[in-house]
Image (tube, rainbow, N blue to C red):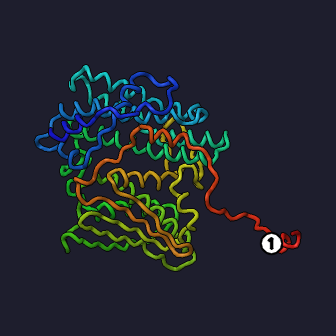
Amino acid sequence: MKAARIALRSAAPLAGANAGSSSGRLPKEVEQFSRFSPSPLSIKQLLDFGSTNGCERTSFAFLRQELPVRFANILKEIDLLPDKLLGTPSVKLVKSCIQSLQELIEFHQKSPDDHFIDTLIRVRNRHHDVVPTMAQGVIEYKDTYKVDPVTNQNIQYFLDRFYMSRISTRMLMNQHTLLFDDKSGSGHPRHIGSIDPCCDVVEVVNDAYESAKLLCDQYYLTSPELKLTQVNGKAPGEPISIVYVPSHLFHMLFELFKNSMRATVEFQENSPTLSPVEVTVVLGKEDLAIKVSDRGGGVPVRKIERLFSYMYSTAPRPNVDDGRNTPLAGFGYGLPISRLYAKYFQGDLNLYSICGYGTDAIIYLKALSTESIEKLPVFNKSASKHYQATSEADDWCVPSKDPKNMAKQSAAS
């Protein structure tokens, strides 16, 4: 496949890729593959892997090089985390990435017939609980040590990149196994792997709403209705569809619906009727926008960014039992992970809130599959500098919690 050959050729070593830690804690395979830059693919290229002229051996040749590169790049960043965080039991488990990288490297001397799909499935399953595992590590670190603003910022920066890397590696592994594993099947006849070439956006909206409504009804015994509006700016009157991964879109919408429903029910608990959650879907020439609006009382401006922080959560902490049945929602990671899903293919997720009224959450996605290109972290000097940042004095005046008594100060002078 042409797309795969281009991607393979573009995997050139990075200038200065050895920047950062030289602690010697990482095996030579990590050092070797971290010198290469990950090769981002567009949804169009991912579709080409599974099209009628797609070839399992071409996909195999790409993945046996690309997956180790992506694992190695993020492992270099893991090695730059504070030693005390790396020492927590949960974060030690995450370094199983090294084992996965080494297993994949073995296929440089093997063919796809040597149980490559079985290895991909094993690697994917090994990292199934890596998000809550790393979350637990952060909790252990916060509980044991005082976290200063700089460390907080560095951990936020790392986790965005770590989880984005995980989304990307799972995407590649899922595509290969769904397309070429006779035992798995794609699940939906229209899908090419996990991608729907004609993803019905309104259908996904309704599915996510019904799932969130079920939870809301179970917990509160009531739930707000859905008011849906769609505007097709490209083809007025036609259903809105794009080339996308339905499971990613569902994840984002389900999280937004849960938040909106909970806020609406709690804010309007004394009202005889609940205001509906309003969804507006608009397809333009370049972008698809999905706005989820509620009358749930809103959030103060100062708290908006906290909602996307991995280090700040008001949710009760779940119990982690050896990685089984780990309730991710309990870590307060729903919104930050949802925003990463949106950004993965060059989209975004933003919140706009009016305290005392309600909140608008807007998902932006690329309308064209050729422009929906993976957003991938790469380890280089620029990334390394983020972990070397130090606290500097603010160059803007910061209001004091206890304002000076100017009358008393004037009398004293």
In the picture provided, is 45 more to the left or to the right than 302?
left
Closest to the observer, 47 or 263: 47
Question: Which quarter of the figure is the N terminus placed in?
Answer: top left
Q: Tell me, yes or no, if residue 383 can be seen here.
A: yes
Outermost residue, front side: 413
Q: Position of residue 48 (x, y in %)?
A: 17, 44
Q: Position of residue 185 (x, y in %)?
A: 22, 41
Closest to the observer, 135 or 11: 11
In the picture provided, is 363 more to the left or to the right than 49?
right
* 401 versus 32 height, above or below: below
Identify the residue shown where x is 39% and y is 42%. 377
Q: Position of residue 388 (x, y in %)?
A: 55, 40
Q: Quadrant of residue 30?
A: top left
Identify the residue shown where x is 57% and y is 62%. 303
Closest to the observer, 251 or 287: 287
Q: Which residue is mark 1?
A: 406
Mark 1 lies on a secondary structure that is helix
* 316 versus 363 height, above or below: above
Callout count: 1
Q: Position of residue 250 (x, y in %)?
A: 35, 56
Q: Residues within 10 Å of mark 1 (few under 14, many from 20)?
A: few
Q: Amino acid type of disc 1?
A: Met
